[in-house]
Image (cartoon, grey):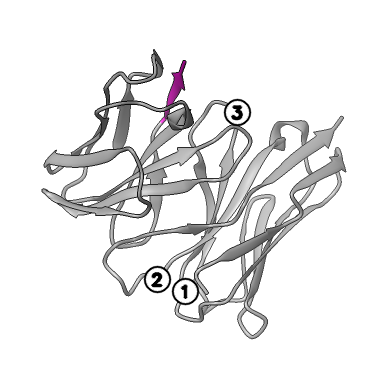
Amino acid sequence: SQTIHQWPATLVQPVGSPLSLECTVEGTSNPNLYWYRQAAGRGLQLLFYSVGIGQISSEVPQNLSASRPQDRQFILSSKKLLLSDSGFYLCAWSVSSGEQFFGPGTRLTVL
Amino acid sequence: QQQVKQSPQSLIVQKGGISIINCAYENTAFDYFPWYQQFPGKGPALLIAIRPDVSEKKEGRFTISFNKSAKQFSLHIMDSQPGDSATYFCAASMLSGNTGKLIFGQGTTLQVKP
């Protein structure tokens, strides 16, 4: 069966520090991968998606970047965090049937 | 035209009642409509999904009703239970594209009172 992992689960970082969030998927090959951000009590904002290794599409201009160094690994990064980067970051994967499955999320607090 | 509008924003239902959440879309190219359930501090979980070739899909107490001509779809939760208290998101996607991108509604917070 397929499994999606995200780490860390929670993170507290100072403004201006770098960020690296990791997502890995098990049990499937060549998935589409997605990064979302969810502000407190709000909806899901798609940040990046990837249809293959090295292929990254950005949905909104921002302080973040994404990379996909391996088929089932998706990384979200920032060189300098802003207060507005705080939120709940969710990784998800999908295959051709359209079903999209979310990871457990990373709670990021920027102070 | 890429938006999915969801209502109501919040909903309070008595235990045993029916919860109804509605969504509307504009893009007629959408051909996949899932619903997600999210508990606080957790990732959204796929609940049920429908494609436009059927008007209704039922899984246990959860039913999606789909009205293609009105470009609307809704989630019905029968015999609502306190354990159903969560945030629900509708979404839409074009399976014909290879991105699998979902366009999400704004979410509905459901509270089921015992």
Q: Where's residue B66, x and y in %?
A: 63, 72
Q: How many marks?
A: 3
| Quarter residue A27 falls in | top left
Give the number of the disc on residue B94. 2
Q: Which residue is mark 3?
A: B40
Mark 3 residue type: Pro
Task: Examine the residues drawn in magenta and state their main secondary structure.
Answer: strand
| Quarter residue B84 falls in | top right
Q: Is residue A18 shown in magenta?
A: no
Q: Could you tell me if the residues under marks 2 and 1 are in contact, i.e. CB atoms within 8 Å?
A: yes
Determine whether, in the image, residue A74 is placed left or right of residue A6.
left
Which chain does tag 3 point to? B
Give the CA separation, mark 3 to mark 2.
29 Å
Magenta region: which residues? Answer: A104-111
Which chain does tag 2 point to? B
Which chain does tag 1 point to? B
